[in-house]
Image (cartoon, rainbow, N blue to C red):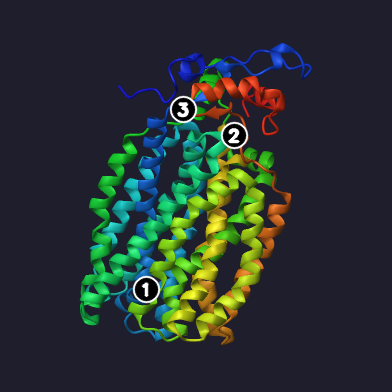
């Protein structure tokens, strides 16, 4: 039997013994409105580490799949649309990449609703299975010379399937990991998720670059381009194994106890979700649009921009971004830990301002044409990316209560991903093609980050605070006793609100 994720020495560590929270908080100084030790959730370190590792490994696998396509985009076009003009082939490849994001809102909404009703664990296992299978099938898909127009049609279909599963992946993974993480260190632990994402991109880039360095161009276009997609199957099986070893979060299990005791389902339908949390959905939407426009510019668009616009060969276009991805990935946990100390809003402000100020100088440096200047320009863009993405995983789920968190995240994140994030490479390349201005991508990044700056202004601070609808979460029983003893002097703990929100279904 899998051990409970809760510490066994306190009544709030086992779901069927969770506190009933039937005391009323009429005045803040009444004893029955005070937090008790049994109210505090203590998540055991081994269980938390297993949950976080399983989530990260699965997310790494998801974004390896996405990254591989991004780094093979310059080859995919000629394989599936051989008779088109070069610019059309490039736009086709990026357009197919954007198609993935068309299905993401549907996946986010459907899988988000299921995640709130059936549990995060089941849905996350499903997303990984579907993503791995679709990626493998792309690797065995016949090309245009074999089946003609059906080749690009089937490619688009498989990318739509990928998009549907990815729509439930990030929203579910962020929901899951933030519900497990202790309040004081949620920024750091949640940022590990994006560390896995960008390492997945980096691994995809490394695999593609290694093949390009060792294989000829005709071989790459003939059959070798399939290898990174085929690798997805064994990697996916490993990731699925790790993900099946984890179980649902303490906050979700406790919420289900409350549902059973009230004999009602608090999960909102789509219309009620929008009506109740439209401000939170809009805030998350804008922040995701700003962060992912810049993030996908660095990860998915740069190989195409360096190759088609700045004249680098395909190998150097990939290799130049690889060290940037690795260093950026390693900086994400540091930025997440920083947000635990100075707040999510401060770090997100720095991200948006950095993107606004650094974008034009970064592109000018890349346009200088030297390897050193290109690398410096890429690093200048990578800094605000690390500051953005390290905080989204912890800040956005904290906008929604437990019973609507997966659904709220799935809707807001994936609508933004469909309209801005996934289309970012396509829009940037189209802007360069139409205007002839090689700085056009910088203008697009600046515009979205101005909107992101405004969203941070209206967002509430959530660092070190309990998740909405959940009790405080700590790592040890000693921390729980200390939290209760100092609850009156803790600026991050509104006891009356915590107890009130935990009692109501949503």
User: Of the residues under marks 1 and 3, which one precedes in the sequence?
Assistant: 3
Residue 202 position in % (x across, y down):
37, 62
Quick one: label 3 or label 2, which is nearer the N terminus? 3
Query: Percent position (x, y) of residue 107?
Result: 47, 49
Going 44% across and 60% down the picture, which residue do you hit?
Answer: 100
Can residue 343 be seen here? The reply is: no
Q: Evaluate whether residue 288 shows in this view.
A: yes
- Marks 1 and 3, Cα distance to the nearest angstrom? 41 Å
Picture quadrant where residue 496 is located: top right
Helix, strand or loop for disc 1: helix
The residue that disc 3 covers is 43
For the C terminus, give its image quadrant: top right
Residue holding disc 2? 467
The extreme right residue here reads 27
Closest to the observer, 391 or 231: 391
Q: Is residue 342 above or below residue 16?
A: below
Q: Quarter holding the N terminus?
A: top left
The Cα atoms of the two marked residues, 2 and 1, are separated by 40 Å
Q: What secondary structure is found at the residue carrying circle 2?
A: loop
Lateral position of residue 80 relative to residue 272, left or right: left
Give the residue at x 47% y 65%: 98
Q: Name the residue under label 1.
A: 318
Q: Nearer the viewer, residue 331 or 123?
A: 331
Residue drawn at x 34%, y 52% is 61
Q: Do the residues labelled 3 and 2 touch (CB within 8 Å)?
A: no
Do the numbered discs 1 and 3 sit on residues whose CB atoms are within 8 Å? no
What residue is drawn where x is 36% and y is 41%? 54
Q: How far apart are marks 3 and 2 (CA)?
A: 14 Å
Q: Where is residue 383 in the image (x, y as percent from the top left)?
A: 54, 64
Tell which tag, 1 or 3, sits nearer the viewer.
3
Is residue 466 toward the left or the right of residue 459 in the image?
A: left
Can you tell which quarter of the image residue 66 is in?
bottom left
């Amino acid at each position: 039997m899998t051990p409970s994720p809760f510490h066994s020495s306190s009544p709030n560590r086992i779901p069927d013994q969770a506190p009933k929270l039937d005391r009323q908080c009429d005045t803040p100084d009444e004893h029955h409105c005070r937090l008790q030790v049994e109210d505090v959730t203590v998540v055991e370190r081994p269980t938390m580490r297993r949950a976080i590792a399983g989530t990260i490994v699965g997310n790494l696998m998801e974004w390896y799949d996405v990254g591989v396509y991004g780094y093979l985009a310059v080859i995919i076009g000629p394989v599936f649309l051989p008779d088109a003009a070069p610019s059309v082939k490039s736009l086709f490849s990026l357009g197919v990449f954007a198609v993935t994001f068309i299905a993401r809102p549907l996946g986010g909404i459907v899988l988000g609703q299921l995640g709130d009703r059936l549990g995060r664990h089941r849905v996350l296992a499903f997303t990984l299975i579907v993503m791995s299978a679709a990626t493998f099938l792309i690797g065995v898909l016949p090309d245009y010379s074999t089946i003609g127009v059906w080749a690009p049609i089937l490619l688009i279909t498989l990318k739509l399937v990928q998009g549907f599963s990815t729509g439930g992946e990030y929203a579910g993974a962020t929901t899951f990991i933030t519900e497990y993480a202790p309040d004081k260190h949620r920024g750091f632990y949640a940022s590990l998720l994006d560390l896995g994402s960008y390492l997945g991109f980096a691994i995809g880039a490394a695999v593609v670059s290694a093949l390009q360095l060792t294989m000829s161009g005709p071989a790459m276009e003939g059959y070798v381009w399939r290898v990174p997609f085929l690798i997805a199957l064994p990697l996916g099986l490993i990731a699925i194994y790790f993900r099946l070893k984890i179980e649902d979060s303490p906050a979700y299990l406790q919420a289900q106890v409350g549902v059973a005791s009230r004999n009602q389902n608090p999960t909102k339908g789509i219309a009620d979700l929008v009506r109740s949390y439209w401000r939170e959905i809009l805030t998350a939407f804008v922040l995701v649009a700003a962060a992912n426009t810049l993030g996908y510019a660095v990860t998915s668009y740069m190989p195409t921009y360096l190759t088609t616009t700045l004249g680098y060969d395909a190998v150097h276009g990939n290799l130049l971004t690889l060290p940037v991805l690795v260093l950026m990935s390693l900086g994400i946990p540091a930025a997440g830990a920083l947000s635990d100390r100075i707040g999510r809003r401060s770090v997100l402000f720095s991200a948006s301002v950095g993107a606004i100020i650094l974008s034009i100088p970064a592109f000018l440096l890349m346009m200088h044409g030297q390897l050193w200047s290109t690398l410096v320009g890429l690093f200048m863009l990578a800094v605000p990316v690390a500051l953005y993405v390290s905080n989204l995983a912890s800040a956005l789920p904290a906008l929604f209560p437990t019973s609507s968190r997966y659904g709220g995240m799935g809707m807001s994140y994936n609508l933004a991903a469909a309209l801005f994030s996934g289309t970012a490479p396509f829009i940037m390349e189209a802007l360069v093609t139409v205007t002839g201005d090689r700085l056009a991508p910088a203008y697009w990044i600046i515009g979205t980050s101005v909107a992101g700056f405004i969203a941070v202004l209206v967002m509430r601070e959530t660092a070190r605070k309990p998740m909405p609808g959940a009790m405080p979460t700590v790592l040890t029983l000693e921390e729980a006793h200390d939290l209760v003893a100092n609850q009156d002097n803790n600026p991050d703990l509104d006891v009356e609100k915590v107890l009130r929100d935990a009692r109501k279904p949503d």
